Amino acid sequence: MFKSRLRLWKDIGKHRDLPENIRVYRGGVSECQHQLVIGKEVPLMCKACKEMYPPANQKKGLPHSTVVIVGKRHHIRFYPTREVDADRSSNPKPGTIVDRGGTARPAHYFVVPDEIFRNRYKRIPLPFQNFADLLEDLTQSMSYIYGCATKAVIICTPAYYTDILCDRARCYLSGVYDTSTYSAASSVA
């Protein structure tokens, strides 16, 4: 599937070359499945890139990739400590980043490999203090581009759209994946 997305990006997007940087936001992964992503999915992604990218690009170390595992943490709730930091409902304002505690409906981001930011920046640009701040700012900014909302959404938009797409696919393909309805019907007959 990853190779088909790379082909689509190049052919349909009319790009001359494959992307230099690939950032993947991977949702739907519980904490006990992180090793599965690290041990199986990331190597498969790297293998697909080796098959797709020309040797000249591979010698340059391309593509640089960053995989971010997105986990929703709806069972944790945080409140602003100052009134100016709250919205009308006394929740933190949309897009609030708390990197030492949490948010009203937090998402947890776990970065597997980070080749993009470490390779691109030799010095960390101000006002950022480290590479995590750069990725955090980009991810937070992407929570504002969800098409159906006027405020920031719970998780970054690519992960949100993927979640919606998977739910829709599950509905369309329920007959293929839900064999319990077929086996129950055949046992009654």
Image (spheres, rainbow, N blue to C red):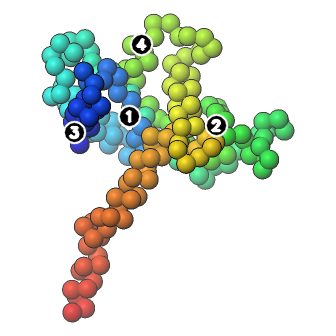
Marks 2 and 1, the one that precedes in the sequence: 1
Marks 3 and 4, the one that precedes in the sequence: 3
Q: CA distance from mark 2 to mark 4?
A: 26 Å
Instruction: Look at the numbered disc 2 and give the secondary structure of its residue.
Output: loop
Q: CA distance from mark 2 to mark 3?
A: 33 Å
In this rendering, does residue 103 appear at all? no
Q: Nearer the viewer, residue 59 or 37?
A: 59
Marks 2 and 4, the one that precedes in the sequence: 2
Give the quarter of the figure containing the C terminus.
Answer: bottom left
Please state which of the two labelled residues, at mark 2 or mark 3, is closer to the viewer.
Answer: 3
As displayed, is residue 13 above or below residue 118? Answer: below
Whether tag 3 and tag 1 are in contact, CB under 8 A, the answer is no
Q: CA distance from mark 4 to mark 1?
A: 17 Å
Q: CA distance from mark 3 to mark 4?
A: 26 Å
Q: Which mark is residue 95?
A: 2
Badge 1 density bin: few <14, some 14–19, many ≥20, Cα 10 Å: some
Instruction: Look at the numbered disc 3 and give the secondary structure of its residue.
Output: helix
* Residue that mark 1 sits on: 24
Badge 2 density bin: few <14, some 14–19, many ≥20, Cα 10 Å: some
Please state which of the two labelled residues, at mark 3 or mark 4, is closer to the viewer.
Answer: 3
* Residue that mark 3 sits on: 4
**Tag 4: residue type?**
Arg
* Residue that mark 4 sits on: 120
